[in-house]
Image: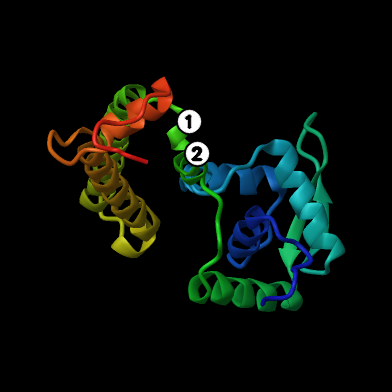
């Protein structure tokens, strides 16, 4: 089991990565994160970015380089990555790539409790989800294809390709699940509905 990191927020990993390109102040980092679409993979806002930078500084992974002021704008502190920060970046990435982590997706939590809803409602909700998933897949595919057509190397779109693959897998799962509920001969629907009505399904002698 990996040791707990001094900074565990994945936003810190992104900050370390961008600082390898040169010293930057938080506003510049925020702009780069948004311009490069990292907010699709890592949740952050202005406040959380400043907090993570302070955590990285306390851990010795980044250091204040200088503080500048332009006109009437507030002072901006420029940060640089340290040697310890470079080592942490590489080690953290190796762990994330090589070691699958146990995650807790909300949809998985819902599936574990899905029997609490009647099957007809579940099928309606699943079909609604399918529409949203297909829309999201189409949007992501268009984003990737447009970037490739614009000359961006596929290496810098690999996370979006992964996202499309996950969407394809979830679409296939939801379609299969709907079929398992609604199949006219072997579907789970009748027994599931009987459970909600408090009746014993036909053919069940227990």
> Looking at the rendering, which quadrant does residue 58 occupy?
bottom right
Spatial CA distance of label 1 from label 2 is 6 Å
- Horizontal side of 143 relative to 46 (left or right) equals left
Image location (x, y in percent) of residue 118? 39, 25
Quadrant where the C terminus sits is: top left
- Horizontal side of 188 relative to 46 (left or right) equals left
Q: Say which residue appears at 63% left-offset and 56% top-offset.
A: 10
- Seen in the picture, residue 196 relative to 167 is either above or below; the reply is above
- Number of numbered markers: 2
The label shown at residue 113 is: 2
- Horizontal side of 191 relative to 68 (left or right) equals left
For residue 130, say whether it is visible: no
For residue 40, say whether it is visible: yes
Q: How is the image coloured?
A: rainbow
Image location (x, y in percent) of residue 170? 32, 46
Image location (x, y in percent) of residue 59? 83, 66
> Looking at the rendering, which quadrant does residue 127 occupy?
top left
Pointer 1: what residue?
A: 116
Whether residues under marks 1 and 2 lie with C-beta atoms below 8 angstroms apart, the answer is yes
Q: Secondary structure at mark 2?
A: loop
């Amino acid at each position: 089991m990996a040791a707990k990191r001094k900074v565990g927020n994945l936003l810190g990993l992104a900050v370390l990565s961008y600082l390898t390109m040169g010293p930057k102040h938080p506003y510049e980092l925020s702009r780069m994160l948004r311009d490069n679409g990292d907010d699709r993979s890592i949740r952050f806002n202005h406040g959380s970015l400043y907090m993570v930078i302070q955590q990285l500084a306390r851990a010795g992974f980044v250091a204040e380089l200088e503080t500048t002021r332009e006109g009437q704008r507030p002072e901006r502190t420029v940060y640089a990555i340290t040697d310890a920060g470079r080592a942490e970046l590489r080690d953290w990435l190796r762990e994330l790539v090589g070691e699958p982590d146990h995650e807790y997706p909300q949809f998985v939590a819902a599936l574990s409790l899905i029997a609490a809803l009647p099957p007809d409602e579940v099928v309606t909700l699943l079909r609604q989800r399918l529409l949203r998933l297909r829309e999201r897949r189409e949007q992501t595919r268009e984003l990737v294809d447009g970037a490739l057509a614009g000359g961006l190397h596929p290496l810098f779109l690999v996370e979006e390709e992964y996202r499309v693959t996950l969407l394809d897998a979830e679409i296939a799962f939801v379609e299969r699940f709907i079929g398992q509920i609604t199949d006219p001969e072997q579907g789970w629907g009748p027994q599931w509905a009987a459970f909600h009505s408090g009746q014993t399904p036909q053919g069940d002698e227990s």
